[in-house]
Amino acid sequence: MTSWESDKPLSPQERLAAAKAAFRGSVLQNDTLFSVLQARLGEPISTDAGLPDFGLEPTLRRNDDGTSTIGLRINRSATTKDSVVSAYVGVYDYLPLGQMDRTTGVTKVTPELEAALTTVGKDKADALGVLQAWQAGVGEMGAQFPEPLTLDPMTDTFELESELMARNYMVAPE
């Protein structure tokens, strides 16, 4: 893969960003999840601003009880306008989708996803498609970026180990 500006290969950071974009494109193909996100993004945020852009990243939090919580991090951006100053604000919103047993792979729907589905007129039966969309999106992301990734302990998102070390996070081997 080469960049548009030159013939030099893309950096790992650029390839990971492209893989996260592939995840976003994949999960947005699910109509139910698209509706949930549309409703969630339509909610006002704490700043008086519009929502010109948003991103999605898969999240995975390993719990001490042998389960993992899978979900989404919704990255919103906004520009606040004052009479003198304009400020760019980034807001992160988390939507836990399922509680997965790491041994059996059985996944239970979270109350947060159930509530989000109810908001858009769907029921718990529609959650299966959302969970499958998440898995397909992670698979697409892995196809785009097959190298190992590390979970950021602060955000539960997938990152390059070198990036986390550069930010002085402790990275524990799995």
Image (tube, rainbow, N blue to C red):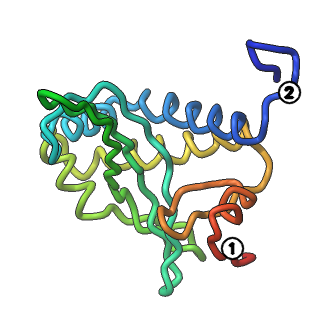
Q: Going from the N terminus, do you reach mark 2 or mark 1 first?
A: 2
Quick one: label 1, few (<14), some, or many (20+) residues within 10 Å?
A: some
Left or right for 6, reference 157? right
Q: Which amino acid lies under the numbered mark 2 shown in the image of this protein?
A: Pro
158 sits left or right of 98 in the view? right
Q: Mark 2 points at which residue?
A: 9
* Residue beneath the point at 48% across and 79% down: 63
- For image coordinates 60% across by 76% down, the residue present is 103
Classify mark 2: helix, strand or loop: loop
| Left or right: residue 158 compared with residue 13 | left
Front residue of 12 and 78: 78
* Quarter of the C terminus within the rendering: bottom right
Residue 98 on image: x %, y %: 39, 61
Q: Tell me where residue 39 appears, x and y as whole percent.
A: 19, 36
Question: Relative to 66, is 30 above or below?
Answer: above
Please name the residue shown 21% across and 33% down the image: 80
Q: Circles 2 and 1: CB distance less than 8 Å?
A: no
Q: What residue type is labelled 1?
A: Val
- Quarter of the image holding residue 50? top left
Residue matched to label 1: 171
User: Residue 45: horizontal and vertical position, in percent?
Assistant: 17, 44
Say which residue appears at 43% left-offset and 36% top-offset. 55
| Badge 2 density bin: few <14, some 14–19, many ≥20, Cα 10 Å | few
